[in-house]
Image (cartoon, rainbow, N blue to C red):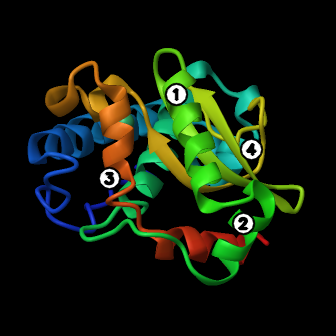
Amino acid sequence: MPFTLPDLPYAFDALEPYVDKMTMEIHHDKHHGAYVSNLNKALEGTEWVSKSLEEILAGVSKLPAVVKNNGGGHWNHSAFWNWMKPKGGGVPAGELANAINHDFGTFDKFKEQFTSAGMTRFGSGWAWLIFQHGKLVVASTPNQDNPLMDVADVKGVPLLGLDVWEHAYYLKYQNRRADYIAAFWNVINWDEVAKRFAVAK
Ligand code: MN
C-alpha cells in the first residue's frame, strides 16, 4: 500500500469553535481515509504504484477517473489539515504579505476574492490561492481536482486551499457555506502558506 492516512497535526477538537470535533473526526477518518484506501486499490498492480502522488496528479489524464478523484482527495486533504491550526488566523507577514499586497492590492481584497471563489463554486470543490507564472492567483476547482493536475483548468502551485464540499461544514453550518468560509479565516496556518510560497517562488 503506497499511500497512508496521515495523522491530524492537532486534536480533533483543536479547531473549535470554528470547525467542530465531529466534522473533523468524520472528515479525516472516514472521508480522507476512504480516498487513501480507494487510491491504493486503484493503483494496485499498475506501474503507477511506485510514483509520487505529485507525479500521478501531473499525469492524471492518462489514468482512470477513480485515480483523479481519490488521488486528488488524498493530496488536497493532506495539505488541508496543515493549512489550519489552533489559534491560527490573523494576517500573513513578510514576503507573502508583500506578494499579496502586490498582486491583489490589499489583504482584504485577496480575502474577498478567495471567499467569492469558495461561494461561487457550484456543488463540491475547492477554493485556492496558487502561485502561477510568477504571481499569486485565486482559483477554484470542482470535486477533488487541484491545480497540480494536468487536466486542471487553472494550473499552478497550491499555497492555500479551502474544502467547500458540504461534508466539510454541514454538521455545524448546514447550508450556511458563507459562515463556514468566514470562520476559516480564524484557523488559517499562515506559516504553512508562507513555507509553500518560499518553495514555489
Ligand atoms: Mn473534504
| Mark 1, other Cα within 10 Å: few <14 / some 14–19 / many ≥20 | some
Spatial CA span between label 2 and label 3: 36 Å
Residue shown at 41% from the left, 68% from the top: 189
Q: Relative to the observer, which residue lies in front, 66 or 110?
A: 110
| Mark 2, other Cα within 10 Å: few <14 / some 14–19 / many ≥20 | some
> Which numbered marker is on residue 5?
3
Q: Position of residue 15 (x, y in %)?
A: 20, 58
Q: Quadrant of residue 37?
A: top left
User: Which badge, 3 or 1, is on the more N-terminal residue?
Assistant: 3
Residue annotated with mark 1: 69
Q: Relative to the observer, which residue lies in front, 177 or 21?
A: 177
Kind of residue indicated by mark 3: Leu
Residue shown at 41% from the left, 69% from the top: 90
Residue annotated with mark 2: 101
In the drawing, does residue 61 fall left or right of residue 66? right
Which of the four quarters of the rendered structure image does ligand 1 lie in? top left
Kind of residue indicated by mark 1: Asn
Say whether residue 34 is visible: no
Q: Quadrant of residue 103?
A: bottom right
Spatial CA span between label 4 and label 2: 30 Å
Furthest residue to the top? Answer: 123
> Which numbered marker is on residue 58?
4
Q: Position of residue 73 (x, y in %)?
A: 46, 37
User: Which badge, 4 or 2, is on the more N-terminal residue?
Assistant: 4
In the drawing, does residue 6 fall left or right of residue 20? right
Tell me how many marks there are: 4
Q: In the rendered structure, are the residues bearing label 1 and label 4 in contact, judged by CB atoms less than 8 Å apart?
A: no
